[in-house]
Amino acid sequence: MAARTASPFWSLTTVNTSSSCARILPAPDQLTLAFWTGGEHGRLLIQRCGSCQHCQHPPSARCPQCGANQLVPVTMSGLGTVATYTVNHQAWRPGLSVPYSVAIVELDEQPGLRLTTNIVGCDPQAVYIGQRVRVQFEQQEDVWIPLFTPEKGASRP
């Protein structure tokens, strides 16, 4: 297993590996553990407030809608829509394959419930706003990174 060193940037850790591309991996804590490990069982887990039912991401200790602290991880469908994206042509890390797409995906369960991710399984230039996507997971050490791939049969409007 690769060694992790603490990074001051967004509480992430840096992975030192000899593989072709080392991702920056999160350091899961009590609030984020379900999100980063749910993929082991094929589940995209997002916090939901037990009081008002509002879903939120990223996870936090209190609901931004009602202030309650009764938050539990619940399984999402894993379906969503590309709200915005960019195609990156800069290899920011050694061995990083370019180009690649970075997108904000809005999940079907709630308007405004969004997460930043990569769109994989297609040419990065083929990604578009409004594209229907489905979650898949990439295991890196002890975390499962949610990535999204275009839905089969979906076509550009």
Image (cartoon, rainbow, N blue to C red):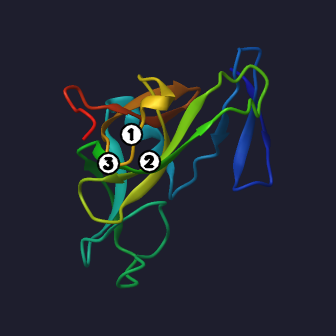
Residue behind mark 3: 130
Q: Secondary structure at mark 3?
A: loop
Q: Are marks 2 and 3 in contact (CB under 8 Å)?
A: no
Instruction: State how far apart marks 2 and 1 are (Cα).
Output: 6 Å
Instruction: State how far apart marks 1 and 3 are (Cα).
Output: 26 Å
* Amino acid marked by disc 3: Gly
Q: Secondary structure at mark 1?
A: helix
144 shown above or below 51: above
Q: Secondary structure at mark 2?
A: helix
* Mark sitting on residue 38: 1
Residue at the spot 74% in from the left edge and 19% down from the top edge: 95
Residue at the spot 53% in from the left edge and 56% down from the top edge: 30
Residue behind mark 2: 35
* Amino acid marked by disc 2: Phe
Q: Quadrant of the C terminus?
A: top left
Front residue of 95 and 140: 95
Crowding at dot 2, Cα within 10 Å, few <14 / some 14-19 / many 20+, comes out as many
Q: Which mark's residue is nearer the viewer, 1 or 3? A: 3
Q: Are marks 2 and 1 in contact (CB under 8 Å)?
A: yes
- Residue 107: x and y, percent? 31, 53
